[in-house]
Image (tube, rainbow, N blue to C red):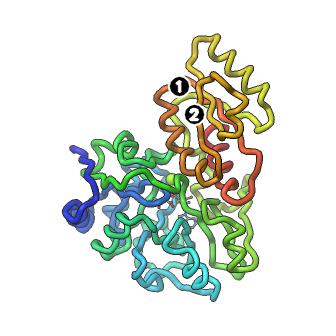
Amino acid sequence: METLIKEITAQSIEEAVKILKNGGIIGMPTETVYGLAGAGTMPEAVKKIYAAKGRPSDNPLIAHVHESYDISRLVYIEHKYIRELIKAYMPGPLTLVMKSRGVICKEAVCGGDTLAVRMPSHKGCRALLKAADMPLVAPSANISKHTSPVTAQQVYEDMHGKIPLILDGGKCTGGIESTVLDVTEQVPRILRAGLITKEMIEKITGACEIAQHKEGDKVRSPGVKYRHYRPACETALYAADDIGGVLKRYDEECAAGKRAYIMCSDEAAKNFPGKNLLPLGGTGEEIASNLYDMLLKGEKVADIIIAVDMPREDGVYLGITNRLRKACG
Ligand code: TXA
Ligand code: MG
């Protein structure tokens, strides 16, 4: 199958909708990462998504809808705070896990009784969802366990030959996947950290828990248990204050003839003048937005990426450290 990359226009959206309505799957941009989208009510489309990714069949998908779509058609909105969260942060990088009404097919939720729903804020994605006017289930558009793509070209590299069309909506601005929040209980619980932070959620709901995924626990968000986001090259992760360790490793790898690159924040980069760098930026938002892009650029030029961990875990840094440690740890 030939895979075409097309700019988002009325015409390419029409083409995409035709493919989706026929049970096909496509690459679509969102503000977080690119998704691999199919009709949420069509088992054949869902099966294609799992096959293209090589995704384990116990890991459910997120349903994406446009902002005028009434999500109570898909799920039961059981708590008052849910409406307030929707009003505050959607469309945006927030996914809510609620009790499903069973409209989205069981293949997409792996037979579970909950459904994750999200309203992307990306302009092109919104136009696609409006034109399709049906929920699209979409995981990140990478081969399972590889780094999630943030450009149409990066989607192409994992998915060419497997899907007919990738809509090009530019580089994703968010850069890490949406916050996944379980809102089935009285107190919401973060299953996957992201750009909508614990602090932002607490502003609306008062309290917010963070799920601890321990060995042997019943996993509430199966995706978080896998090794994840890994680039194709070797990686190593050093603590934020272990500058000496990073430099020693860099020299050793170079002496062994390897192409070593240090991936770190602009702040940390001051310690590594003259070295090969994969710079992540200054603020938390910049770092999130560049993280996957630098991992995917890095795997092309480096034999080993030596990553420097972040010195904090508050706000968006929780999502950043979670990804960085899985990708490079
Ligand atoms: O930003 C995003 O969320 C991107 C873009 C494409 O929208 N999508 C994405 O999908 O990251 P995926 O499939 O790569 O990750 C979905 C995460 C997984 O950790 C999965 O286990 C969790 O959401 N999830 C999905 N449905 C769930 C459910 N019903 N209950 C608990 N966790 C769920
Ligand atoms: Mg993913």
- The image shows residue 199, relative to residue 152, as above or below, that is below
Q: Provide residue 247's location: percent of width, then percent of height.
A: 73, 23
Q: Nearer the viewer, residue 51 or 4?
A: 4
* Residue drawn at point x = 72 percent, y = 78 percent: 187
Question: What residue is shown with label 2?
Answer: 278
Between circles 1 and 2, the one closer to the viewer is 2
Q: Which mark is residue 302?
A: 1
Q: Secondary structure at mark 1?
A: loop
Q: CA distance from mark 1 to mark 2?
A: 10 Å
* Residue drawn at point x = 50 percent, y = 42 percent: 293
Which quadrant, please, contains the C terminus?
A: top right
Q: Provide residue 66's location: percent of width, then percent of height.
A: 40, 75
Q: Provide residue 46's location: percent of width, then percent of height.
A: 37, 61
How many C-alpha atoms fall within 10 Å of the one at disc 2: few (<14), some, or many (≥20)?
A: many
Badge 1 vs badge 2, beta-carbon distance below 8 Å: yes
Which quadrant, please, contains the N terminus?
A: top left
Q: Provide residue 213's location: percent of width, then percent of height.
A: 71, 57
* Residue drawn at point x = 38 percent, y = 66 percent: 123
The three-letter amino acid code for the residue at tag 1 is Ala
The three-letter amino acid code for the residue at tag 2 is Leu
* Residue drawn at point x = 71 percent, y = 36 percent: 268
